[in-house]
Amino acid sequence: MKTAVVTDSNSGITQKEGAALGIFVLPMPFMIDGETYEEDISLTQDEFYGRLKEDADISTSQPSPETVMNLWNRILEDYDEIIHIPMSSGLSSSCQTALMLAEDYDGRVQVADNHRISITQRQAVLDAKIMAEGNMAAEEIRKELERTAAESSIYITIDTLKYLKRGGRVTPAAAALGTLLRIKPVLQIQGDKLDAFSKARTMKQAKSTMLAAIAQDLKNRFGDPEAEHTWIAVAHTCNEEAAKEFVSELKELYPKTGEIIANPLSLSVACHIGPGALAVAVTRCLSGEREDRA
């Protein structure tokens, strides 16, 4: 059985990375000042942040049904089946659309809603690839991804409240007060929601809060306080140097965790929180064993 792995660019996997890994990546569309762009096709990270800083009107969208089906049809010329891993159904309607479209494929397309986005979605995709290479059927992979959906967390600290205010997630008055007091909120993505978790006055305090949060998750939720069987990853929005520094700190704290990657947050998250953000994620290894990551 030859199983293809498909995801979208919300996973943070670029077209180039996808080609190298043997993973098919649907580019997510964005509307910027009335024009449609596709992530990593006609819109680079630098271009996106440039437009964001110019206060362009930016909104997220989803691939058209035709785009999704055209990709699936092309893949099924060479593969027996597909495991499709979109971003969480709680954060986008693209998952529900894919589920509806898959009904016409007689089980050859399995859509996994494992309630993840960005770096935790990326790990689910890499896990799916390993399972597919181990001859697991698409339906089995889907069930495993959905069974382990809750076994991950992302914590994010942001540099400015401006973009949360623009998206209506905080009131203008609260944003103004937060800016005046130099508050740096710590947000959490666990499952379907981007929620407030805590707040700090400095980036150092925010990082300490995130480190304490993942320590609690590793101990209480995963039963793996030294992260021997847990992936740790760092992500950022236009904040590469801080991300590298954070990786070094995490390596000292968790020397048994293996490789810690640092990648840009997906643009679908970035458009709501703006540049300067820093995030850390923990995701349980599905097999309990480590594999090298791309």
Image (cartoon, rainbow, N blue to C red):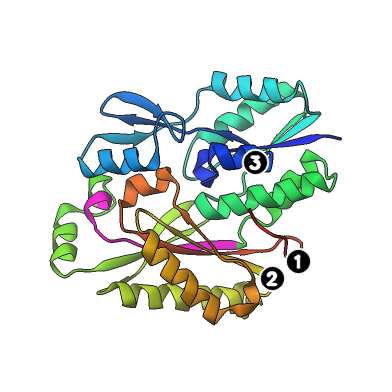
Residue 161 falls within the magenta-colored stretch: yes
Q: Which residue is mark 2?
A: 229
x, y (%) of residue 54? 20, 40
Q: Secondary structure at mark 1?
A: loop
Q: Are marks 1 and 2 in contact (CB under 8 Å)?
A: yes
Tag 2: residue type? His
Labels 1 and 2: the sequence-earlier one: 2
Q: Which residue is mark 3?
A: 20
Labels 1 and 3: the sequence-earlier one: 3
Q: CA distance from mark 1 to mark 3?
A: 23 Å
Q: Quadrant of residue 74?
A: top right
Q: Which residue is mark 1?
A: 289
Q: Secondary structure at mark 3?
A: helix
The answer to whether residue 196 shows anywhere in this view is no
Pick the front one: 27 or 252? 252
Tag 3: residue type? Ala
Residue 104 falls within the magenta-colored stretch: no
Residue in view at x 31 percent, y 65 percent: 185
Tag 1: residue type? Glu
> How dense is the environment of label 1, judged by Cα within 10 Å: few (below 14), some, or many (20 and up)?
few
